[in-house]
Amino acid sequence: MSSLLRLLAASTLAVALAAPAQAEDKNTITVGISVGTAEKIFDVVQKVAARDGLVIRLVKFNDYQLPNAALNAGDLDANAFQHKPFLDNQIKARGFDIEPAGLTVTAPLGFYSRKIKSLNDLPEGASVGIQNDPSNGNRALRLLAAYKIITLKPEAEQKNTATPLDVVSNPRKIKLVALDAAQLPRSLDDLTAASINNDYAEQAGLVPARDAIGREAPDGPYANLIAVRTKDRDQPWVKQLVAAYQSPEVRAYIEKEFKGSLIPAF
């Protein structure tokens, strides 16, 4: 991520958190989300929650590495941007004392290209972009393996820990290029194909259900979730937040607005 985007994320956080997160009063909470589709969904979530007496303040992030650190530090009451394998990796790497509180949406990861129409058409020596964070990089490699572009060590697949070092067969001799997730859409002109998370794909004008040249099955293990600090797991506002997200109104909005690009996981 560029230094400018980090500055913007930090500035947004500083403004939104001029006062401490208000988990204690049970009526106002601060939730970190990623920019893009989550903003649209949480516009509906906020309205449903307000009807039941819960005010949700949003802090928007451009960097997947920041929301869990902010939550663990107490600058957020909750966040909603990640799937469980990503959270598990961050907890293992950084010792965060946070945990899932409820599921939100599944966003099947896709590969995109301006040069080919299907992952099966990858030519020999193609440059293929994948995310450089452990969770999403593993996810991209597993998708390439599902399309039989590469073969991975069985142990790495089973443990969801695949890295380029775990590639044991690469008959097309594709060149894996690991980049920050936010840079991948901007690199499409230089790559044959790239794995792009849905939020970043939508920001780049791509429609995952229409434009992806290869895509995860919607029933995979990567449902996104709401996370909270472990000590807050049983607070009443957590149940209110999850109930607001998992409401019929939010489900109907997701199904109508995203037409299969995002799928309710609840």
Image: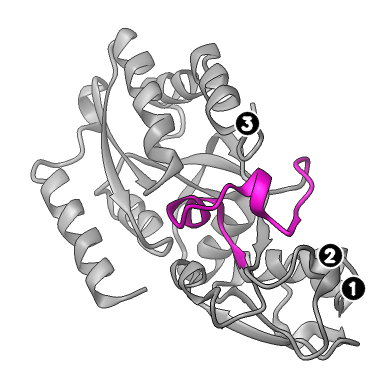
Place of residue 78 in the rendered image (x, y in percent of width and height, measured from the top left): 37, 40
Residue 205: say if magenta.
Answer: yes
Which residue lies at the image location 52% right of the left edge and 28% below the top edge?
257
Magenta-highlighted residues? 195-219
Pointer 2 residue:
158
Q: Where's the C terminus, which quadrant? A: top right
Q: Nearer the viewer, residue 136 or 96?
A: 136
Place of residue 184 in the rendered image (x, y in percent of width and height, measured from the top left): 51, 71
Mark 1 lies on a secondary structure that is helix
Question: Crowding at label 2, few (<14), some or many (≥20) Cα neighbours within 10 Å?
Answer: few
Which residue lies at the image location 15% right of the left edge and 58% below the top edge?
11
Pointer 1 residue:
154
Confirm or deny contact between disc 3 and disc 2 (CB under 8 A). Answer: no
Q: Nearer the viewer, mark 3 or mark 2?
A: 3
Q: Is residue 248 left or right of residue 127?
A: left
Q: Is residue 204 left or right of residue 213?
A: left
Q: Nearer the viewer, residue 235 or 179?
A: 179
Q: Nearer the viewer, mark 1 or mark 3?
A: 3
Residue 172: say if magenta.
Answer: no
Q: Nearer the viewer, residue 213 or 135?
A: 213
Which residue lies at the image location 90% right of the left edge and 73% below the top edge?
154
Mark 2 lies on a secondary structure that is helix
Of the numbered discs 3 and 2, the one sitting upstream in the chain is 2
Name the residue type under label 2: Gln
Name the residue type under label 1: Pro
Per the model, the C-alpha gap separating discs 3 and 2 is: 31 Å
**Residue 166 in view in this figure:** yes
Name the residue type under label 3: Lys
Mark 3 lies on a secondary structure that is loop
Confirm or deny contact between disc 1 and disc 2 (CB under 8 A). Answer: yes
Pointer 3 residue:
259
Give above or below for 244 relative to 86.
above
